[in-house]
Amino acid sequence: MSGSRTGRPPVQGAARRPAAPRPPRESSVQRFYIRARKAWDRPLTAYYLIVGGTLLIMVLGLVMVYSASQITALQLSLPGSYFFRKQFLAALIGGALLFAASRMPVKLHRALAYPILAGAVFLMVLVQIPGIGMAVNGNQNWISLGGSFQIQPSEFGKLALVLWGADLIARKQEKRLLTQWKHMLVPLVPVAFLLLGLIMLGGDMGTTIILTAILFGLLWLAGAPTRLFSGVLSIAGVLAALAIWSSPHRLNRLSCIAATDPGPNDMCWQGAHGIYALASGGLFGSGLGASVEKWGQLPEAHTDFIFAVTGEELGLAGTLSVLALFAALGYAGIRVAGRTEDPFVRYAAGGVTTWITAQAVINIGAVLGLLPIAGVPLPLFSYGGSALLPTMFAIGLLIAFARDEPAARAALAMRQPRFGRKRGAGGSGSGRSPRRWNTMRRRASAARSSGER
């Protein structure tokens, strides 16, 4: 008898569905890349990069200033830690300026633009008055503050141009005036040329190049047409060529690019010994404090050529670390400028980033023999309080702008202290509400149903 033992017809088995193809398993490299990308895209990434990068550059710079300046201090019959102590004091003052700038609202930064510009112009005019201004290494760009303390007003001219230029362009953009070339150039370019002229009277070509870079950065961010941008660049190039050809000293510096020996009359002595210092460092360097070139062979070892001493003592690893820190700082500044909707913040952040990046490239390029020696310090790294103070104030601007992003403000607002209550809040019988902390946990608990755990 066909069928099953129960007399019922056999049940046909249901047709099996084909198994869905499994998604390909992600490799460990892909998982790491995804996690790194998510971490990189967080709202506070720029904030952490600016704070962390600045702190690391400052600490490493203080260490290298102490190492590179000992021999110079002893040759001048000074204590070995003389330059380090002055730099450390400038770092403390600069830290206070950085903190103050990072806490200022944007309106206050804009209000400070004109006073800082007027003060910088006034000080640069004082430099040219006999008996007030003083020359250092052939450049008349310093004012003595008494004792061993000096100030270089042209360094504050960089900060003045960034703040004033950003405020000016932002106000013109709000009034829709940037479509006209005369509003694009006037009065930004004439005031910038005034600053450049006062600096060139003292013979400081390096600072002039950096201010020119800031001017071009502001024009680029403002959306200057290519024809207008090229015209200003051509005029600046002609003026720079005249300044170089009129000075035999600048011509010698130009001819010392990529020099590997001092040349006739030791004309390329500094550049050649900078290359020697880098070449003798190897992969991991000769050790901290073990530089040979700083023993009188390399001029300006703790200022303009501190990167060469870093390469000799810390090797390729140390120099690449410095380059990575400056690259991170530059990326963070570009990110802040690109994500904001406030025109002033965009122009100011872009101006500060152009300033620090251009100065770092000019200094490092000169040490590597790729650019002429311009006599500019490495930002936040080289010895020099006059350069350090305005730079740290500018970093404070970037920190304030990074904190002011909408997503960053929301992320910072979610942070609450883990322990403690408000001052004055009593215990259980005080009748006062405890401090609102642990917000996420309380909201999650309120959102649960009674059956969830």
Image (cartoon, rainbow, N blue to C red):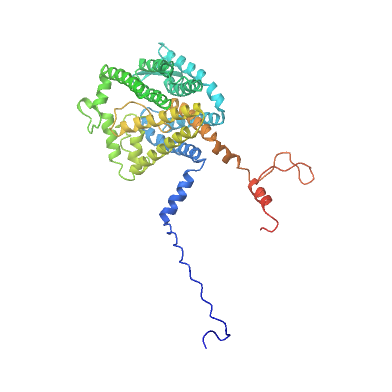
Tell me residue 331's x, y (percent). 43, 37
Tell me residue 221's x, y (percent). 42, 27
Give whichever of 98, 218 is nearer the camera: 218
Give whichever of 248, 114 is nearer the camera: 114
In the image, taking residue 446 as reference, residue 87 lies left or right, namely left
In the image, taking residue 79 as reference, residue 299 lies left or right, namely left
Tell me residue 83's x, y (percent). 42, 30
Number of numbered labels in the structure image = 0
92, above or below 150, in the image: below
371, above or below 41, in the image: above
367, above or below 7, in the image: above
Question: Which image quarter: residue 64?
Answer: top left
Tell me residue 147's x, y (percent). 46, 21
Residue at horizontal 48 percent and vertical 38 percent from the top: 46
Residue at horizontal 35 percent and vertical 32 percent from the top: 361
Question: Which image quarter: residue 223?
Answer: top left
Give whichever of 235, 77 is nearer the camera: 235
Look at the image and tell me whether residue 177 can be seen. yes
In the image, taking residue 347 as reference, residue 288 lies left or right, namely left
Look at the image and tell me whether residue 383 can be seen. no
Residue extending farthest front: 1
Residue extending farthest left: 264
Which quadrant holds the C terminus? bottom right
Residue extending farthest top: 130
Question: Which image quarter: residue 450?
Answer: bottom right
